[in-house]
Amino acid sequence: MKLLEFKNTIQEVWSESTSDKIQILKAHMQALVKDKDLINQLTSPLIEDDLILDHDERLGYYLYAYSEGQGTYRQPHNHGNGWVIYVVLSGIMEMATYFETKSDDGESHIFEKEHYLLTSGDGRAFYPGDIHHTLSLSEGTIILRLTSIDLRGELAIGRMKRY
Ligand SMILES: [Fe+2]
């Protein structure tokens, strides 16, 4: 799978249901991270900041690549109304998922649900409302992230929440 093919696939499947889209695009991203050209582009030199690999203004999605140093921790968060697919290109990433309960006074409490490691070629998808954390366990872990909408917007209006 080449980046250009993947970009075309996103366009082709965008009108499918969310669950079908996520299933198809996650499988394709898992193939995409094996592409030598993409690996070269992201590793020599190692990308640091978020690199936008694809974005469609009309459909709203973003495909990012980024790297994280060992120990970089992204505290538990949801993604507002967006869904997100993460696929590791190289390195090791820990993730945990959480469920949320609310006490009678409306206060949120989160509890860990699952805990797992992702290495090269592994991917996970998160639906709107799903809560997770990420922790890079290796130096220069490279991750591809496809988000259905601009998460910065979700954060700005308070729908994307950190716990
Ligand atoms: Fe996330």
Image: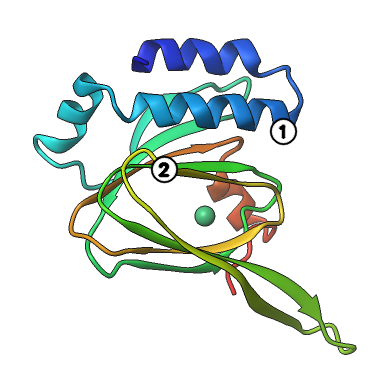
Q: Residue at the right extreme?
A: 104
Judge by depth and name the residue closer to the eye, 66 or 35.
35
- Please tell me whether residue 90 is drawn above or below residue 55 in the rendered image: below
Residue at 60%, 37% in the rendered image: 149
Quarter of the image holding residue 108? bottom right
Cα distance in 3D space between marks 2 and 1: 18 Å
Q: Residue at x 55, y 26 (%)?
A: 25
Q: Residues within 10 Å of mark 2 (few under 14, many from 20)?
A: many
Q: State which quadrant residue 100 falls in.
A: bottom right
Q: Is residue 68 above or below residue 146?
A: below
Mark 2 falls on what kind of element?
A: loop
Q: Position of residue 7 (x, y in %)?
A: 46, 16
- In this picture, residue 140 sits left or right of residue 59: left
Q: Compared with residue 80, is residue 120 higher up or lower down, i.e. above or below?
A: above
Residue in the picture at 37% in, 24% down = 32
| Front-most of residues 156 and 162 | 162
Depth order, front residue of 87/74: 87
Q: Which residue is mark 2?
A: 122
Q: Please say whether residue 50 is visible from this viewpoint.
A: no
Considering the image in quadrants, where does the N terminus appear?
top left
Residue 38 % position (x, y): 24, 25
Relative to 113, is 45 above or below?
Answer: above
Label 2 sits on what residue type?
Asp
Q: Which residue is mark 1?
A: 19
Q: How many marks?
A: 2
Q: Earlier in the sequence, mark 2 or mark 1?
A: 1
Question: How many other residues sit within 10 Å of disc 1, few (<14), some (14-19) or many (≥20)?
Answer: few
Q: Mark 1 belongs to which amino acid? A: Ser
Q: Quadrant of residue 23?
A: top right
